Image (cartoon, rainbow, N blue to C red):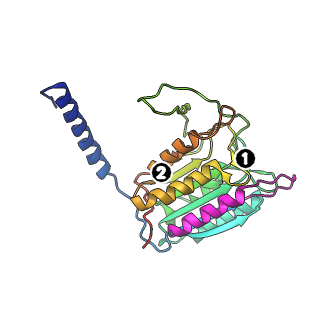
Amino acid sequence: MRFIGSNDTATKLRAEYSKSIVDQLSSSIEVYNMNSKPRGTCVIFNNVNFTDGKKRSGSDQDADALENTFKWLGFEVKVLRDRGVQDMKDKLEELSKKVTDADCCFICCVLSHGNATGVQGCDNAVLPICDILSPFSGIRCPALAGKPKVFFIQACRGSEMQKKVNIQADSLGEKEVEFESDFSLDSIISIPEFADFLISMSTFEGCFALRNPERGSWFIQSLCDHLTKLCPQGEDILSILTKVNSDVGAMGTMRAKQIPEPRFTLRKKLIFHVPE
């Protein structure tokens, strides 16, 4: 399209034209069905006490926030505390077999220690991320095929502290923000068996995830806060997670910074409307 007129007029027309295109593309994206009551199961693994004597203080605050948030959003919530790796695997297999065609979504939250390969059970063994996801693939859990499977994982993914990087603000008065490098999905996600997955990691690969012993983790508390504020406004989950990234990325000091890392193979918009 060619725009004719003054610079101000041309700029305004370009903006209106761009918005029109974005609106058309946005409206063409389908939305996942969220009409069942309950919408499905939300399981929360809350590992607090470990066999080596370590304790994750503040994790109970995260578990409570998640439980309250997803009950409010229409899910049947199960909280499982201090589970070893085999118990976690067995429970995930059991839950995948109990999914019915009436369920329209599955949510799994894992609160634990972790490293580059996975999350720890309270027995200090490591459960790989792929073993958390695979019971809910389209092949192994056909009742959830074509439906969203959502995983929120609060755990360290290494022992590096994310460093502070200064970038130029885009406008006057804009606060300093953080920039992190791109990531690869290839190591975890496979299409099409693993379509309709969302995995939201609390921190970037190789880095610490930070938690306040009294108030809970930066990621989970921000997630629940933004879900509570934005779901009633009809925001989709990816938009909400972008706001969580912005919120968590602004926290901390020069020594302690963090940015969460969502990965997804969603094919539609996922919107958790608040049940009536």
Residue 190 in sight: no
Q: Which residue corresponds to the image point at 69% horizontal and 40% vertical from the top-left?
A: 208
Q: Check residue 136 for magenta coloring.
A: no
Graded by Cα atoms within 10 Å as few (under 14), some (14 to 19) or many (20 or more), the crowding at tag 1 reads: many
Query: Which of pointers 1 and 2 indicates the residue nearer the eye?
Result: 2
**In the displayed structure, does residue 213 sit left or right of residue 175?**
right
**Number of numbered discs present?**
2
The percent coordinates of residue 209 (x first, y second) are 68, 44
- Neighbor class of circle 2 (other Cα within 10 Å; few <14, some 14-19, many 20+) is some
Residue 262 image-quadrant placement: top right
* Residue 48 x/y as whole percent: 77, 58
In the image, which residues are magenta? 47-74
Residue found at the far right of this picture = 52
Q: Is residue 81 left or right of residue 265?
A: right
Q: Label for residue 114?
A: 1
Mark 2: which secondary structure?
helix
Answer left or right for 28 relative to 137: left
Residue type at tag 1: Gly
State the mark number for residue 93.
none
According to the image, label 2 marks what residue? 240
